Amino acid sequence: MGAWQPLPEEFPAEVRHFVEQLRLLKDRTGMSLVALGTRTAYSKSSWQRYLNASQPPPRQAVVALCRVAGLAGEETERFGVRWELAVRAWPREPAPPVRVPAGGPVPGPGGESAPGAEVALPAAHGRDGYEEDPTLPWWDLLDEESSRASREPAAPRTSRLLLYAALLAVVLLLAAVVGAVTLG
C-alpha cells in the first residue's frame, strides 16, 4: 500500500488531486486491489488503471470505494465533485479515424454519402466519452428497488395487498370446504 506510480507532471491539477485522494481513500480501506475488486464489482485491473491514472474511473466505482471506506454524506459528495472536475480535465487521446472500404457509404455533413471517408468514432459511453453508469452490483440494485418502491403511491400497493389477502382467503375457504367434504 502506498507504493504508487508517480503521476505524470503534465496531468492537470484536478486529475492529480483526484487520483491522489482516491489513492489515499483506497489505502485507508487497508484492502488489496483484489479484495477491493470483490467488494466493489470492479476488477483488480480496473482499479489499477483508475489508481494509476491511466483511465478515469466511472462515477459508480468512486461511490463504491467511498462506501467500502465507510464514507457517507458530505464526504462522498466531495468525491463526486472531485470526480466531475477530474473527468472534465482528464487528458484524452483523439479518437482514431475509421477507414471505410472503398464504395462503402459514410454519411457526410448534411447527410450525403462520402465513399471511403474517414470518420472519428463517437463517444461510446456517457458525457465526455467516459462511462458513468456501468453495470451495478446486485446489492446496489436492491437499494434502487427499495427506494423506487418507497416512492410508489400507497394506494396501488394497498390494493395489491388486499387482492392477495382475498385470494388467500378464497384458497383457505376452498381447502376447508374440500377437507369437510372428504371427512364428512
Image (cartoon, rainbow, N blue to C red):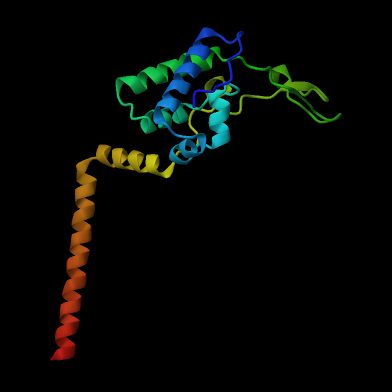
Q: Position of residue 6 (x, y in %)?
A: 58, 16
Give the quadrant of residue 27: top left
Q: Is residue 179 left or right of residue 70?
A: left
Q: Is residue 51 left or right of residue 110?
A: left
Residue 151 sits above or below residue 17 on the image: below
Does residue 164 appear in the picture of this structure?
A: yes
**What is the tally of numbered marks visible in this picture?**
0
Farthest right residue?
102
Residue 95 sits above or below residue 179 on the image: above
Q: Is residue 39 left or right of residue 53?
A: left
Give the quadrant of residue 120: top right
Residue at 61 percent across and 13 percent down: it is: 8
Quadrant where the image shows the C terminus: bottom left
Residue at 20 percent across and 66 percent down: it is: 168
User: Viewer-proximal residue, 76 or 135?
Assistant: 76
Residue at 19 percent across and 76 percent down: it is: 174
Q: Position of residue 11 (x, y in %)?
A: 58, 11
Q: Is residue 165 left or right of residue 17?
A: left
Q: Position of residue 145 (x, y in %)?
A: 34, 42
Give the quadrant of residue 64: top left
User: Viewer-proximal residue, 135 or 63?
Assistant: 63
Does residue 41 appear in the picture of this structure?
A: no
Q: Position of residue 170 (x, y in %)?
A: 19, 69
Residue at 16 percent across and 87 percent down: it is: 181
User: Viewer-proximal residue, 59 or 20?
Assistant: 20
